[in-house]
Amino acid sequence: MPNHQLLTGLKVAKHLGFAEVWISNPSKANIKVLTQISTPEYPRVFQRIDIGLHEKNKANLISIIRQQRRQIPIIAMTCTTPDIAAWAAQDNRVDILKFRPFEIGKLLNRSVAKLMNKYQKHLEISLIDLYAFPYRTHIATIRNIRNALIMVLRKHISFIISSGSARLDQLRTPRELASLGQILLNNTPLPLDALSTTPRNLLTQNLQKIVPEYVIPGVFKTPSPNNHELEER
């Protein structure tokens, strides 16, 4: 996405009511632009990486994650096979699991859900996914997504609803996205947490993982006294 389109999109997102926006797989040029944004007319911007949709080789996926984990706060995996789904649900470097609408009923089973609960993964449902595969989005698909959401709620798995938009005309307000959740959950009241508190808590937790001092959750390196002495000299 060219820089001017990216900036326009961020302004629109702010106007629609978003205080923060996650940008997926930004180019180097866009990263430079994003680091310079600091005015109130834009939302706060953070990077995420989405993998798995086109690259399906597990070894390559592991290599990508290993390179990016200390640089990008959010890593989302689109699971396209049972093997990838089971592995991603257990890998501590993966934060979010995604499934294509027409495969979620087959791939997000109880075993994967149990692992997602154990390793504290998030499920993401993107509105754009329903647009991207219109010929496969029918009643059975909606039913499968709904059943998956009901199952993750029972398993106490956090889930996120996003627009997943890549164009201005795909942006939607938070309330519209919440309405999608209500439809998928058969009009069950859906808290706006899936659009705000849940992703924010995940981001806050993961921003700690990309600082140089981070070792494991709750453990950080501390500079040695010798290093301080050298710096003072």
Image (cartoon, helix red, strand yellow):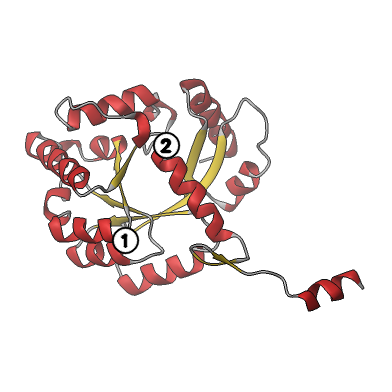
Residue 187 x/y as whole percent: 17, 24
Q: What residue type is labelled 2?
A: Thr
Residue 51 x/y as whole percent: 37, 57
Query: Where is residue 195, by image quadrant?
Result: top left
Q: Can residue 166 be seen in this view?
A: no
Foreground: 82 or 93? Answer: 93
Question: Which residue is depicted at the point 27% across and 24% down?
Answer: 179
* Residue bearing mark 1: 119
| Dot 1: element | loop
Residue 224 x/y as whole percent: 73, 75
The first of marks 1 and 2 along the sequence is 1
Query: Where is residue 220, by image quadrant?
Result: bottom right
Q: Is residue 27 visible?
A: yes
Q: What residue type is labelled 1?
A: Tyr
Foreground: 143 or 220? Answer: 220
Cα gap from disc 1 to disc 2, whole angstroms: 19 Å
Above/below status of 220 relative to 150: below
Q: Residues within 10 Å of mark 1 (few under 14, many from 20)?
A: some
| Dot 2: element | helix
Above/below status of 229 relative to 209: below
Above/below status of 214 relative to 148: below
Foreground: 145 or 7? Answer: 145
Residue 164 x/y as whole percent: 37, 39
Question: Which residue is depicted at the point 10% across and 37% down?
Answer: 143
* Residue bearing mark 2: 197
Q: Residues within 10 Å of mark 2 (few under 14, many from 20)?
A: few
Question: Which residue is depicted at the point 54% across and 36% down?
Answer: 6
